[in-house]
């Protein structure tokens, strides 16, 4: 029995090594392709998912909306008011259906300012609505994590969505980057 374990273990390690090295090259080329050509409305959900670290919804428009939301969130983590405004405008442009009117209003408020404090105030409501959208949409690839910072919003707490379980707080940026916790996997 011991004689069978060693060849099996070696075979398994080789297979995993090949699979992992193939995937990393594939993702890298997809990212480069997306970066060099920009995101097009007609791109398939799989390609868009590569730009958002492998998250995709059944509806391509929802995937695009979440990609824009996550880029906005990342700009808030960096406390880059100019970039946040640009990303909020991108998100706003994707919210064309009337069912997204209140999300679009929050994105608009964020886009109108370059002050991270003002942007973060509207991000609270935007994130709550995005959480509802995520829970009511069919996720077909990847994971989303509902995260919470108890100190945001004047110590009332506030939520956001992330692709990773690692906390990168958009409400405080580098002042309290790790403040928060994962509340649930969506």
Image (tube, helix red, strand yellow):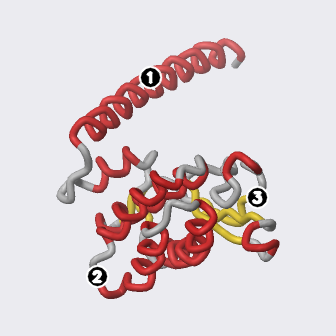
Q: Which mark is residue 97?
A: 2
Q: Compare marks 1 and 3 and give the one earlier in the sequence.
A: 1
Q: Residue furthest left?
A: 42
In this view, the mark in front (1 or 2): 2
Mark 1, secondary structure of its residue: helix
Mark 3, secondary structure of its residue: loop
Q: Which mark is residue 180?
A: 3
In depth, the one of 12 and 143 nearer the eye is 143
Mark 2, secondary structure of its residue: loop
In this view, the mark in front (1 or 3): 3
Tag 1 residue = 21
Q: Which mark is residue 133?
A: none
- Residue 161: x %, y % from top left: 58, 62
- Residue 151: x %, y % from top left: 80, 66
User: Residue 37 lies in what quarter of the image?
Assistant: top left
Q: Is residue 117 above or below residue 14?
A: below
Q: Marks 1 and 2: CB-CB under 8 Å?
A: no
């Amino acid at each position: 029995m011991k004689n069978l374990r060693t060849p099996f273990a070696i075979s398994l390690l080789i297979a995993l090594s090949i699979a992992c090295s193939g995937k990393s090259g594939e993702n890298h080329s997809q990212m480069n392709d997306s970066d060099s050509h920009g995101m097009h409305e007609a791109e398939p959900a799989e390609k868009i998912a590569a730009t958002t670290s492998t998250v995709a919804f059944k509806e391509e428009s929802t995937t695009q909306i979440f990609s824009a939301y996550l880029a906005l969130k990342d700009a808030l983590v960096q406390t880059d008011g100019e970039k946040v405004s640009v990303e909020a405008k991108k998100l706003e442009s994707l919210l064309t259906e009337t069912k997204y009117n209140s999300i679009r209003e929050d994105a608009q408020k964020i886009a109108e300012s370059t002050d991270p404090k003002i942007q973060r105030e509207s991000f609270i409501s935007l994130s709550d609505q995005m959480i509802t959208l995520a829970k009511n949409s069919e996720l077909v690839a990847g994971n989303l994590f509902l995260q919470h910072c108890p100190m945001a919003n004047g110590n009332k707490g506030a939520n956001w969505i992330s692709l990773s379980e690692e906390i990168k707080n958009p409400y405080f940026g580098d002042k309290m980057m790790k403040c928060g916790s994962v509340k649930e996997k969506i």
